Amino acid sequence: MSNSEELIPLSGPDITDADRKAVAEVLAGRTLALGPRMVAFEEALAAYVGRREAIAVSSGTAGLHLAIRALGIGGLDIDGRDASAGADEVITTPFSFVASANCILFQNAVPKFVDIDPETLNINPELIEAAVNERTRAILPVDVFGLSADMTSISEIARKHDLKVIEDACEALGAECAGKPAGSFGDASVFAFYPNKQITTGEGGMIVTDDAELAARCRSMRNQGRAPDDRWLAHERLGFNYRMDEMSAALGLSQLGRIDEILAARAEVAGHYISELSEVPEIETLATPAGYRRSWFVFVVKVMGSVERDRVMDYMNGHGVQCRPYFTPIHLQPFYVERFGYAEGDFPVTEAVSRRTLALPFHNSMSGEKVRKIVEVLREALQST
Ligand SMILES: *Cc1c(COP(=O)(O)O)cnc(C)c1O
């Protein structure tokens, strides 16, 4: 493929006429915020993951922040506890998108990183108990690349040590662990609807829980701390504007209505990749362990052996195929290094994995032909490096 041809982007939204119509209907009306679409989207998503309550918010990051705050974690919790009371700790993974650890810092709590399993790329449950101490308040596992963390083991550890669980399911709508949906495990779980996720609202997110009181606190805090009866200027606690608007909710509701179709299309694209790449010895695709259903989010491969991932990536980016390293470890992000003094070697499995992982273009409507083209460029890249 030559440079002159169009770049194959890393991801792309899948918007149908029905989606456009749903948004246009909102714009034709008078209620653009705090309206019936938000409530309908919440009810539909709660039903989809089998939860009693869902709270739509303006992003996945906002959802994670509210969930942690509503659970009373951190120095500035909903009861106005003093920030100097000592830092709560939340156990989480360094192999994730930075928001999953940042949301802990938002509350003046401290992320306590635990290394990952080299196969699942999720937090390694066997290492969690060694990280628990008297300041530990919660575990925040992330369902990385659409594969649920080992929520059975994590829930058991949390019960044993009386810890809360916040499931970051932002990459895993439609995934399953032990026959249950991702997002159905934590005290609170959070989904995200940025355009590269399984379904999109543009920007948006959703907290789900079975705890009605927790849900009420989240609803109040997303809406400037207003009382539940929503008297316009009655603010009973410090809140935020983390609301989801009606255009976003209408889009989300429309997309959720064809979630099975979307997940099947994504699984088909992943299937094309897996079969094409089975012939490429330097590339390993991600396995899905028994007892799990992966909901394909991004298509990440591992570049094995002595091949340098960055050179492969540069070649592909220069030859019409957009690729990205996915993820750079959170503990090695500059401000984490500065604040906590982390260094190379602190989480060796995460670091080794993140040197090899590469995200290839992936979206719902990619043809088998396009996948073959991308794999062809990948083979060229491997030969030329
Ligand atoms: C996308 C994502 C988020 C945050 O979602 P936004 O809607 O972009 O704020 C959080 N955690 C993980 C693991 C994600 O992939």
Image (cartoon, rainbow, N blue to C red):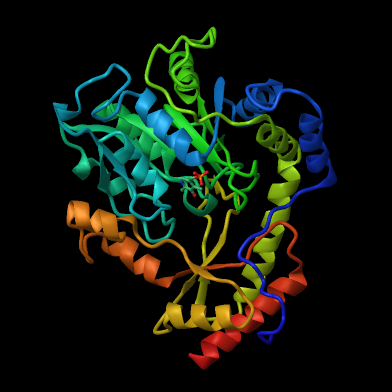
Q: Quarter of the image holding residue 321?
A: bottom right
Instruction: Give the residue at x 33% y 55%.
Output: 330
Judged from this view, the residue extending furthest toward the front is 233
Is residue 241 something one can see in this rendering? yes
Instruction: Report x, y in % for residue 325.
Output: 46, 68
In the image, residue 12 above or below residue 81: below
Instruction: Give the residue at x 73% y 72%.
Output: 370
Q: Nearer the viewer, residue 199 or 30?
A: 30
Is residue 178 something one can see in this rendering? no
Q: Nearer the viewer, residue 78 or 130?
A: 78
Instruction: Report x, y in % for residue 302.
Output: 47, 70
Q: Nearer the viewer, residue 179 or 205?
A: 205
**So how many labels did they put on this image?**
0
State left or right for residue 292 relative to residue 336: right
In the image, residue 26 above or below residue 384: above
Instruction: Report x, y in % for residue 196.
Output: 60, 53
Instruction: Report x, y in % for residue 170.
Output: 51, 43
In the image, residue 61 above or below residue 382: above
Judged from this view, the residue extending furthest toward the bottom is 384
For the N terminus, give its image quadrant. Answer: bottom right
